[in-house]
Image: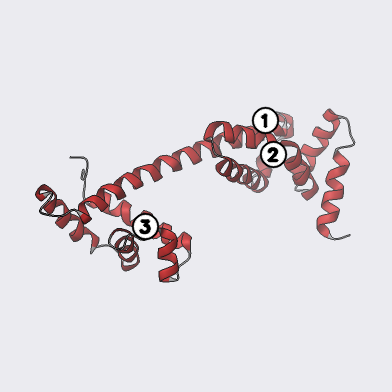
Amino acid sequence: MNACGMVDAAAEAYADEAPSAREERLAAAFARGDEAGLAAAYRAWAPLVRALAWRSLGDARDAEDVTQQVFVAAWYGRHGYRPQRGPLAGWLVGITRRKIADALAGRTRRAELTAAAGAAAAVLTCDPAACPEAVLDRLLVRRELVKLPPAQQTVLRLAYYDDLSQTQIAERTGWPLGTVKSHARRGLHRLRENLGTWPED
């Protein structure tokens, strides 16, 4: 039997016990770093974690991401769990709430950056004859754009002048998609900081 099979078999053993005894033994195994305890904890409480995340986030993929984050965080932070202070399920729910809050905060940041990107794109592509009041704003954006690091400039120029998606930018540049997203996020953040209250005025 391979290592994964041994962990699965050990995890299955927890299912044959009475619920209270199983939870106590499972929590103790988890706290001491027993991988079978982690597998059993995931089987027992991942549905609860996923349901809580889905209820708050309303998105199955985001809920699955949060579920994975919760169990990774729990595993690496298992030395902070004290069985005598409460059940493992309650501790996992506490981690879940923090991860949900992080996910919601991330959504807010992405929405703000998307709004800033939309406003920047409107200024960058506006026809001067059609909206002369935007000419100064467009010049300001161009001036700040050239101050960005080359990689951030490249991503933003491809996005707003060539109208490429981040996936297309990754294909054109050969950079990983995560790198493209990071450059876009940092570039937009710097533009927004450097332009002060623009474009809200």
Residue 2 appears left or right of 92: right
Q: Residues within 10 Å of mark 3 (few under 14, many from 20)?
A: many
Q: Residue, x 86% and y 54% (percent of image)?
A: 6
Q: Which mark is in front, 1 or 3?
A: 3
Q: Earlier in the sequence, mark 2 or mark 1?
A: 2
Distance from label 1 to label 3 (Cα)? 38 Å
- Disc 1 is placed on an element classified as helix
Identified by mark 3, the residue type is: Ala
Distance from label 2 to label 1 (Cα)? 13 Å
State which quarter of the image contains the N terminus: bottom right
Residue 100 image position (x, y, % from top left): 54, 37
Q: Earlier in the sequence, mark 3 or mark 2?
A: 2
Contact, mark 2 vs mark 1 (Cβ under 8 Å)? no
Residue position marked by numbered label 2 in the rendering: 46
Q: Which mark is in front, 2 or 1?
A: 2
Residue position marked by numbered label 1 in the rendering: 90
Q: Nearer the viewer, residue 21 or 48?
A: 48
State which quarter of the image contains the C terminus: top left
Identified by mark 2, the residue type is: Ala
Residue position marked by numbered label 3 in the rendering: 184
Q: Nearer the viewer, residue 188 or 126?
A: 126
Contact, mark 3 vs mark 2 (Cβ under 8 Å)? no
Q: Residues within 10 Å of mark 2 (few under 14, many from 20)?
A: some
